[in-house]
Image (tube, helix red, strand yellow):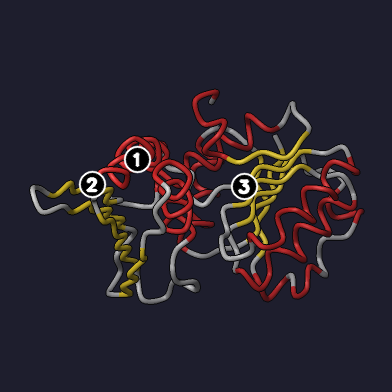
């Protein structure tokens, strides 16, 4: 496929590397080449099969709008924009294109989401819960999109609003911890990313999955189909 990757940060660069290894043709754009989505013209996007966005919360919505308007399929790993989901969903459905987003494209994290959903039943038995997330000092948003997803899952499954505590330190790739505490015992769940490669591989495989589909999808709902 012809893939356009928006963002040449640590994750975006690794997505490009993984895509090359999987024999895709890759074009990349950095923020200074695409201010306010100015580079995403119909002519520039014409040969592109899927756009993959790992930019910033400030840039992602304009990028998405430009791609959707010309019917280009898009995979979005950027977080911090989810208040726009209803509006962008309607744009995608109207344009009859494909859009897939996720707070985390790691298979391990998506398994972790399901474990949290099961463990959240503890909230109904006098356990109090809390979420801790740790990331590198240059991460743009806090709390992380993954932590917010965990919070939403715990609320839906257990009915409890878990507090999120965020830490920004060193070059931590991403660690998410969930605890449920009672007078009798303590449940401790943790996912610790060793590298960004899991995110990158998931994003490229998501683009391959999306290539033949239309609709608006969240990665945690479809990852088993990859």
Residue drawn 39% across the image and 35% down it: 114
Instruction: Answer left or right for 80 relative to 182.
Output: right
* Residue occupied by mark 2: 189
Please tell me whether mark 1 sits on a helix, a strand or a loop: helix
**Label 3: how many Cα within 10 Å (few below 14, some 14–19, many 20+):** many
Binning the other alpha carbons within 10 Å of mark 2 as few (below 14), some (14 to 19) or many (20 upward) gives some
Whole-angstrom CA distance, mark 2 to mark 3, is 25 Å
Q: Earlier in the sequence, mark 1 or mark 2?
A: 1
The residue lying at 63 percent from left, 51 percent from top is 76
Q: Position of residue 193 (x, y in %)?
A: 30, 51
Residue 135: name its quadrant.
Answer: bottom left
Measured from the top left, where is residue 181 in percent x and y? 18, 54
* Closer to the camera in the image, 72 or 225: 225
- For residue 29, side relative to residue 117 (left or right): right
Q: Quadrant of the N terminus?
A: top right
User: For the point 66% across and 72% down, which residue is it?
Assistant: 31
Q: Which residue is mark 3?
A: 101
User: Depth-wise, is mark 2 or mark 3 nearer the camera?
Assistant: 2
Q: Earlier in the sequence, mark 3 or mark 1?
A: 3
Asked whether the beta carbons under mark 1 and mark 2 sit within 8 Å of each other, the answer is yes
Residue 219: name its quadrant: top right
């Amino acid at each position: 496929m012809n893939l356009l990757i928006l963002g040449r940060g640590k994750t975006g660069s690794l997505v490009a590397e993984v895509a090359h290894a999987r024999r895709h043709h890759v074009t990349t754009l950095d923020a200074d080449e695409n201010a306010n989505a100015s580079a995403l013209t119909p002519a520039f996007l014409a040969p592109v099969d899927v756009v993959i966005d790992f930019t910033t919360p400030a840039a992602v919505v304009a990028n998405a709008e430009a791609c959707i308007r010309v019917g280009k399929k898009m995979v979005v790993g950027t977080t911090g924009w989810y208040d726009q989901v209803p509006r962008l969903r309607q744009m995608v459905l109207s344009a009859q294109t494909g859009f897939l987003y996720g707070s985390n494209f790691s298979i391990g994290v998506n398994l972790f989401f399901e474990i949290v959903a099961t463990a959240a039943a503890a909230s109904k038995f006098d356990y109090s819960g809390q979420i801790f997330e740790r990331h590198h000092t240059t991460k743009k948003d806090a709390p992380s999109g993954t932590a917010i997803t965990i919070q939403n899952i715990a609320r839906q499954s257990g009915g409890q609003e878990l507090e999120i505590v965020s830490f920004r330190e060193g070059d931590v790739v991403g660690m998410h911890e969930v605890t449920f505490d009672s007078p009798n015992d303590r449940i401790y769940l943790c996912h610790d990313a060793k590298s960004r490669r899991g995110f990158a591989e998931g994003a490229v495989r998501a683009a391959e999955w999306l290539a033949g589909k239309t609709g608006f999808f969240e990665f945690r709902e479809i990852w088993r189909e990859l």
